[in-house]
Image (cartoon, rainbow, N blue to C red):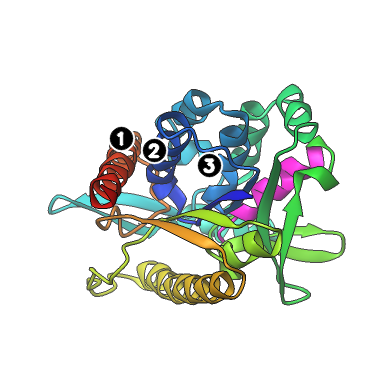
Amino acid sequence: MKALVISGGGSKGAFAGGVAQYLIEALKRDYQLYIGTSTGSLLTSHLALQKIDKIKNVYTSVTNDSIFDVCPFVVKQKHGSQNIAINHISVMFNFLRGSKTFGESHNLKKLIEETLTVEEFNELKQSSKDVVVTVSNLSLNQVEYKSIKDFGYEEFVEWIWISCNYTPFMTLVKKNGCEYADGGLGNMVPIEEAINRGATEVDAIILQTEANQLNRLPSRNPFSLLTNMFTFMLDRIESQNIRIGKFTASHNDAIINFYFAPTVLTTNSLIFNKEKMTEWWQSGYNFAKFKNQEISQLET
């Protein structure tokens, strides 16, 4: 059984979309299992339906306003680069409302509902393909995997949304008596779960470079320090997930084809820039094409 696994990575998901487009449309990869974390969860349903142009349009037109109803930061352009600073008014307003997070991402849930229709959900649920999203249960201190086969439309849409909620910058969701957050806090690259579900060949799209290519600039304010700390922790989690995935594959005679980002796409994946994400989608497609042509040449 073939599986497509897409890691978390916020706005960098545009690159993953381009890679997946080449694998599905050009190479005609027929996946029976799609597993995503965070931004990967947003992609998987549409990729399984082969509605690639539809999800591409979303990723290449989305803005911060499409994601946040309370945006906790402002983006400042300085010396040719984008920096973030805390939006004091929005954050204070959110705390006064009793929120536990700096920002709120209910607009993202609306976007998911507008993008994935009930008819598309039913078509996918009745098919032989399985779509699984990763969430973090903070109350029970465990990672959970939610299959489309086990839920109705409204609940599965909520699980997709929860998988993308990068707390404490986005909404913390209380569901079934537990607090849930971004799946990446527990498993950024769920290769092990794909193999445990029966995958014998996995195409894994990783939204960071294979080797560390980045020395971060000093934190400019408490907010940038917090984002740098979370990015550091998620990078460590991702590296561990990849090692566990390789170990599991070697003990189950499974094959993993890795697609790492060839360059650092952005230092802040919470910034959703339409022009950049359009470029990343195309570069993902071109990278997957180049990589597979290179493999073909080596085999001949």
Residue, disc 1:
282
Q: Amino acid at mark 1?
A: Gln
The stretch drawn in magenta includes residue 161: yes
Please report the residue visible at 44 percent of the width from the left and 74 percent of the height from the top: 239
| Magenta extent | 154-166
The residue identified by callout 2 is: 18
For label 1, count other residues whose C-alpha is less than 10 Å away and answer few (under 14), some (14-19) or many (20+): some
Tag 3 near tag 1, CB within 8 Å: no
Image location (x, y in percent) of residue 228: 37, 71
Closest to the observer: 258 or 274? 258
Spatial separation of the CA atoms under disc 3 and disc 1: 22 Å
Q: In the image, residue 115 lies at what x, y percent? A: 61, 28
Front in this rendered view, residue 21 or 169: 21
Report the disc number at residue 210: none
Q: Amino acid at mark 3?
A: Ile
Q: Amino acid at mark 2?
A: Gly
